[in-house]
Amino acid sequence: MDAKNEKQIKDQVKQGYAKVAQQGTSCCSSGCCGNSAYQAKEVSQAVGYSETEMSAVPDGANLGLGCGNPVALASLKEGDAVLDLGSGAGFDAFLAAQCVGKTGRVIGVDMTPEMVAKATENIKKGNYTNVEFRLGEIESLPVEGNSINVIISNCVINLSPDKEAVFKEAYRVLKPGGRLMVSDLVLAKDLPLEIKNSVEAYVGCLAGAIKKEKYLGLIKQAGFQDIKIISESSYSVDAMFDHLDAAQDAIVSINVLAIKQESEETNEN
């Protein structure tokens, strides 16, 4: 993909999620296109969040945009430094903050100014002292190298037109032995062209998805080891777009765990 098309896609995604932030509605493809907190709750429950988790974050933090629950699978510990890629209004970041405690810290990175502003407001609502949100792109993270214990991400990397750069950046900022825990959408088969070329579908998490094997291959190519699919399930899509029925059996939701090697020497052979 050339730089012009990549920028166009990023601009379109940014505009779409700015609208979500401003209206408090989800544009995801999981049946969460409505405009109520109830629908966001329904979606989050369907992808693995408990009632306790959904009640533990500030109002407006959960926009129903996820396709899994990476925090539940990340085995976060007290004192961990956690990075949330595409943090949105802060739902997963705030859940992570409760796991890592006062001695830990959570950084959320999002490329949409409206989302960062909304998440920052939610910090104040919840009186969090160990969370911050930074404006930036996940392909070029505003985070220093070797500084993070665990990276989480929820249905965001599929939106990136340069997933290779995302995983390389994730590897760069993780400490040796650090973990990547990603919930994302991948393809079991190719999408119909009318969906692949749809801007709405891209913002809705569909058109940016790639084949599962390629997705896992990019993680390995970035240097990660012990790459495991923790869980996998078919992903329900609704009648949000024309021709969406053709995508019903093409979309798969996966939870992937990967480890950054302990030292550069371990990967020499």
Image (cartoon, rainbow, N blue to C red):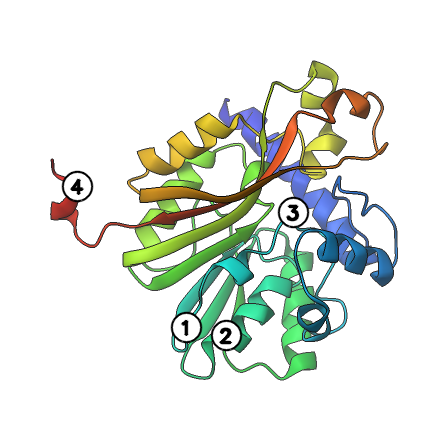
Residue at 76% in and 42% down: 30
Gap between marks 4 and 2, in whole Å? 31 Å
Gap between marks 1 and 4, in whole Å? 27 Å
Q: Residue 255 carries which label?
A: none
Q: Hey, which quadrant is residue 22 in on the image?
A: bottom right
Q: Verify CB contact (< 8 Å) between mark 4 and mark 3.
A: no
Instruction: Report whether residue 145 is seen.
Output: no
Residue 142 position within the rendered picture, expressed as x and y whole percent measured from the top left: 43, 56
Dot 2, crowdedness within 10 Å: few (<14), some or many (≥20)?
Answer: some
Q: Which of 189 and 37 is in front in this view?
A: 189
Dot 4, crowdedness within 10 Å: few (<14), some or many (≥20)?
Answer: few
Residue at 64% in and 38% down: 11
Q: What residue type is labelled 1?
A: Lys
Q: Hey, which quadrant is residue 139 in on the image?
A: top left
Provide the residue designation for mark 2: 99
Q: What residue type is labelled 4?
A: Asn
Q: Say left or right for 35 vs 87.
A: right
Residue 84 position within the rendered picture, expressed as x and y whole percent measured from the top left: 51, 58
Question: Which label's residue is closer to the chain start, 4 or 2?
Answer: 2
Question: Which label's residue is closer to the chain start, 3 or 2?
Answer: 3
Q: Say left or right for 5 vs 43.
A: left
Q: Which mark is residue 77?
A: 1
Q: Which amino acid does label 3 sit on?
A: Cys
Dot 3, crowdedness within 10 Å: few (<14), some or many (≥20)?
Answer: many
* Outermost residue to the top: 193
Q: Residue 67 carries which label?
A: 3
Q: Residue 267 carries which label?
A: 4
